[in-house]
Image: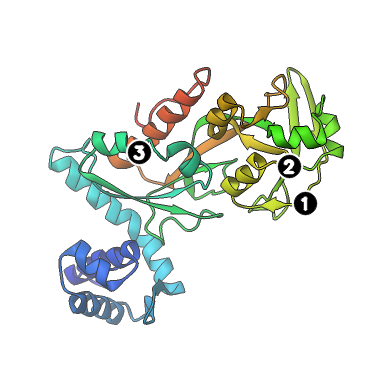
Amino acid sequence: MPFDGRVLSGVSVLAAVVEGGSFVKAAELVGITDSGVSRAIGRLETRLGVRLLDRTTRSVTLTDEGRRFYEEVKPHLNAIEDAAVVVSGAASAVRGRLKVDIDPFFLPLVLAGRLGAFCERYPDLSIEFVTREHVGDLVAEGIDLAVRFGQPRFASLVARKLIEAPILTVASPRYLERHGRPGHPSDLIGHRCLQFLDPYTGRTFEWEFIRGDETIEVSTTGPLTFTDPKAMLEECLAGTGIAQVIGWGVGQALASGSLIDLFPDWHGERFPLFAFHPSRKHPPAKVRAFIDFCAEIASGLEPSASRVPALGS
């Protein structure tokens, strides 16, 4: 197939549809009418000989062929964008739109209330957050970056560990008044422990305790199992049971006495926070800036933590 400039134009419109999620939003992104978007997609589908999008009155999604095509062309669009930024003399400019798949704990319990500083720092950048249990297909869904706890599971993505978070075992004074305070992690066998489901394995997380060179695992049980960390924390605060949580999100509750750190000598277990982004030679400045901001916030919450070097440093 000889090069056809209309194919490149159609691909740009397709990228806008994927990123915007609709023809209406795509029209706003590329500055044409809704019908112009529809015609551009139609011409591209005709040129390629395949249907790229499934359209309904409520949604627009990539077909299997469309997803394969988009995964192939997206890196080239990114390279063109990078080249344009470099040539314009603004290689370090943080601007445009950033779509972030964010951890359901990290956003509400760590970042929320602190994002205003980032917005003030980069007034030409707008951010859309997506929060869900699983990291999806970043390229196909037009997502620039994912920030998640846990070990990397995505071979096709670049993973950078930002920092490691402490795991605390906590309970409310109300729970301890009713059920007593466990003196050792092994005592948890007889307590009501709130369980959290690993979305990738479908099993509840094991409770592990580390003190120096000593590591023990405790088989815990309880009446409730969660996939939402904020809901689990609310139940813990209400006195329903004991929970293991990422320490960053409970600092105020510990300071006020709403939660009690049951085993302050057993803080050896750490949970890594990673940033994931599609493989590219030079991650965009907006991606680097947000990753640095997340690491900055996390490091500030735990002064003793060591943060990794910034992207590109």
Q: Which residue is disc 2 drawn over? A: 241
Colour scheme employed for the rendering of this structure: rainbow
Give the distance between the C-alpha atoms of the residues marked 1 and 2, in whole angstroms: 9 Å
Most distant residue in the left direction: 88
Q: Which quadrant is the N terminus positioned in? A: bottom left
> First in sequence: mark 1 or mark 2?
1
Q: Is residue 100 above or below residue 262?
A: below
Closest to the camera, between mark 3 and mark 1, is 1
Give the distance between the C-alpha atoms of the residues marked 3 and 2, in whole angstroms: 32 Å
Q: Amino acid at mark 2?
A: Gly
Q: Which residue is disc 1 drawn over? A: 223
Quadrant hosting residue 125: top left
SS category of the residue bearing label 1: loop
SS category of the residue bearing label 3: helix
Count residues near mark 3 (Cα–Cα under 10 Å), then give few for <14, some for 14-19, many for 20+: some
Q: Are marks 1 and 2 in contact (CB under 8 Å)?
A: yes
Q: Residue at x 23, y 71 (%)?
A: 2
Quadrant hosting residue 257: top right
Residue 262 in the image: x percent, y percent?
Answer: 72, 27
Q: Amino acid at mark 3?
A: Leu
Q: Amino acid at mark 1?
A: Pro
